[in-house]
Image (cartoon, grey):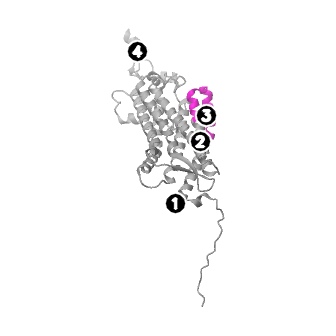
Amino acid sequence: MLRNSTVFVDYPVLNPGAPLRFLDPQIAMEFELGHYVIVGSMAVMVWDFIISIPEDFRLVRKTKLTFMTGVFLAMRVTAVLSLLYATIVDTAKLQDCARHENIDLILFMVNRTCTSFLFYSRVLAVYRRNHCVLAFFGALWLFVIGSASTLFKVVTGSNVGPTPYCAVEVQKGTLLFLTPAAEAVFDTSLCIAVTYRLVSLRSTPETRHTWKRWLAIDKDQNRSLSDRFLRDSQLYFLLTACIKVPELIMMIALAVGTSSISPIQFVLVYPDLLIVNVLASKIYRNMRLGQPGLLAASSHSTTMPNISHIRIGNGGTSSDEVEMATYPQKSKDEEHRYPPGILYKSSKSTILSDSQNGANTA
């Protein structure tokens, strides 16, 4: 009687140079997931860049390529280049992985610098004469740049085993979560400062402390410049917080924890870059071109006031200029709707028309 015997055949490895062969199964799965996230983020960023070319061209033609327009274009270009280069580094065969990773970090740092300065210009626009506030946010902006430069200390590139494919090596430490923490502090402080300034400019003593004013949801007001300026700032902060907070928690847990570094802990870095750049460019483009805000609805008027005299980033705007853009001059139709002798509301207080004032003087 023959016994059942098992015959082991030593099959040859079909692809001995595959990088995943030199990684643990769990690490290999997370490594591949990171590739998918980077490629997907790159595809969305390129798509947004292409469909926005007509509006960007109109923006350049209107603003005559000012300094802030140059910062905006640099932010857009470096975002695309950073994601494209990260995709190449993670998928192509390269020899000097450390050098290529440093190039990607430089693009990432320049993009963060331009993005944060683009939103620093919002503080310049509404706090032009308050040098203490401008100095405070200028220091925060420099802190964001300095924190981004620390990535060169903790992030480097290396080959996966003997293969020519690259992987990112990260050193544990407090510097790891410094960049997302600095960006979170900067975005939160900026949102609070802009909200406080615009609400205080447009509110009366009776409505200054109501929660609806702070949330900018007054249904009786038209969607004017400051309304959209305020709502877009709040929406940007809300959406970016949804991805920055989990990213910051992962970085803190990695820095203070005892577990080993996992590729899944860095999976939100490039989606963060994508979302921040798409929202920042959309908000800046809407402001300069006078387009509806991010929350524009069909039930509201989509006509923006004339803001050709408003200078964002080139000296800023005073409180009077913000009021002029928020409450434009009345049109002829409005003059028929509000005949002489009838009370109407101004940006500062309720005043009488010219004929009524003349009658009172007589």
10 Å crowding of disc 3: few (<14), some (14-19), many (20+)? many
Residue 132: x and y in percent read 40, 26
Can residue 223 be seen in this snapshot?
A: no
Q: Which residues lie in the magenta part?
A: 46-74
Secondary element at image label 2? helix
Tell me whether the residue at label 4 lies in contact with that at label 3, contact meaning CB atoms closer than 8 angstroms: no
Residue 266: x and y in percent read 50, 49
Tell me the kind of residue under disc 3: Asp
Secondary element at image label 3? helix
**Which of pointers 1 and 2 lies earlier in the amino acid sequence?**
1
Residue that badge 4 annotates: 356
Secondary element at image label 1? helix
Closest to the observer: 102 or 29?
Answer: 102
Residue that badge 1 annotates: 26
Closest to the observer: 265 or 22?
Answer: 22
**Which of pointers 3 and 2 lies earlier in the amino acid sequence?**
3
Q: Nearer the viewer, mark 4 or mark 2?
A: 2
Disc 3 and disc 1: Cα gap in Å?
Answer: 43 Å
